[in-house]
Image: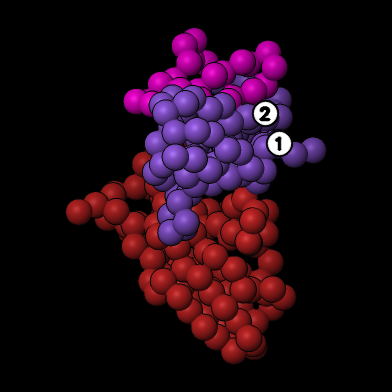
Chain colours: A red, B purple
C-alpha cells in the first residue's frame, strides 16, 4: 500500500535532548513537508523540501533541522534549542510543489 | 495579515442536512490553489477537495463542493447530506507564491447531531 509513515506515534523525551522524528513515503512524491500543530490550532510549516538534497525553512524553523538525502525520507530533528517542543507533528508529501498534500498519521511529542 | 481566515471555531448540523464552512483568503498572487482537509480525532489530515485560481467552475467531490467566489476571496466548503462520520475539524489551506508555500487556517470543528 502506498502512503506516508511516521514513527513513533507517541514520543517522550527529557528536556535538553535532541529527538528525531521519522517520515517515510513510498508514493514517489517529490515534495515533502513538516508541520507542527498545537492544541486547538491550525498547522504551521516548519520545513519543506521540493527535491532531494534541497529544503527551505517554513514559518517556524527555529530549533528544528531536517535532511533530505533520499526522495522517500525527510526526518525532522527537534533540537534542545526549541523552546516549546511539545506538540503534534505532521509530515506530508505531494507529487509536486503545487499539488495537494497527503499526510502521515502524525507523531505526538511530549518533552518534560 | 492572515493568509487564511476561518471565522467559525465550531458548528453544529443535523444529520442529513447541508452545512457550509467559511474560508476567506488573502493573496496578491494570480496563481494559487485552495484546499480543504478533514482532521478526525485520530489526528490524520485527509484531503477533501481542491480549487485552482484559474478554474472556472466550482470543484466538487462527492458530497463536498467548494463555493469559490474569487472577487470576494472566499472558498467555502459545502457538505451535503451530513453524516455522523463528518464530525471532525476542517481546515482550509492555500498554496501560493514562487515556492508554493502552504498556509492553513485555524480550523472549524463540525459536530453532526443524530
Q: Which residue is mark 2?
A: B24
Q: Is residue A105 at all visible to an observer of this figure?
A: yes
- The quadrant in which the C terminus of chain A is found is bottom right
Which residue occupies 55% across, 57% down?
A35
Can you name the residue that lies furthest to the top here? B56
Part of the protein shown in magenta: B54-78
- The percent coordinates of residue B27 (x first, y second) are 69, 28
Counting residues from the start of the chain, the first of labels 1 and 2 encountered is 1
Q: Secondary structure at mark 1?
A: loop
Q: Is residue B50 at all visible to an observer of this figure?
A: no
Which residue occupies 68% across, 13% down?
B71
What's the chain of the residue with tag 1? B
Which mark is in front, 1 or 2?
Answer: 1
Left or right for A85, reference A6: right
Report if residue B61 lies within the magenta region: yes
**Closest to the observer: A70 or B86?**
B86
Can you name the residue that lies furthest to the left here? A1
Q: Which mark is residue B7?
A: 1
Pointer 1 with pointer 2, Cβ within 8 A: yes
Amino acid at each position: 500500500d502506498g502512503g506516508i509513515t511516521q514513527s513513533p506515534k507517541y514520543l517522550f523525551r527529557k528536556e535538553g535532548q535532541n529527538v528525531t522524528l521519522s517520515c517515510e513515503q513510498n508514493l514517489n512524491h517529490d515534495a515533502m513537508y513538516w508541520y507542527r500543530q498545537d492544541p486547538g490550532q491550525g498547522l504551521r510549516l516548519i520545513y519543506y523540501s521540493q527535491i532531494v538534497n534541497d529544503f527551505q525553512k517554513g514559518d517556524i524553523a527555529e530549533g528544528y533541522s531536517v535532511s533530505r538525502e533520499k526522495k522517500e525520507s525527510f526526518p525532522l530533528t527537534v533540537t534542545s534549542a526549541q523552546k516549546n517542543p511539545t506538540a503534534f507533528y505532521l509530515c506530508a508529501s505531494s507529487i509536486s510543489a503545487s499539488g495537494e498534500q497527503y499526510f502521515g498519521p502524525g507523531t505526538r511529542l511530549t518533552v518534560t | 495579515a492572515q493568509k487564511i481566515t476561518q471565522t467559525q471555531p465550531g458548528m453544529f448540523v443535523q444529520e442529513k442536512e447541508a452545512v457550509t464552512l467559511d474560508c476567506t483568503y488573502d493573496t496578491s498572487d494570480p496563481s494559487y490553489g485552495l484546499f480543504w482537509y478533514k482532521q478526525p480525532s485520530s489526528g490524520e489530515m485527509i484531503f477533501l477537495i481542491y480549487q485552482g485560481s484559474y478554474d472556472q467552475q466550482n470543484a466538487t467531490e462527492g458530497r463536498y463542493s467548494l463555493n469559490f467566489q474569487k472577487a470576494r476571496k472566499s472558498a467555502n466548503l459545502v457538505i451535503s447530506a451530513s453524516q455522523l462520520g463528518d464530525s471532525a475539524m476542517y481546515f482550509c489551506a492555500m498554496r501560493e507564491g514562487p515556492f508554493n508555500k502552504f498556509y492553513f487556517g485555524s480550523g472549524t470543528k463540525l459536530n453532526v447531531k443524530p
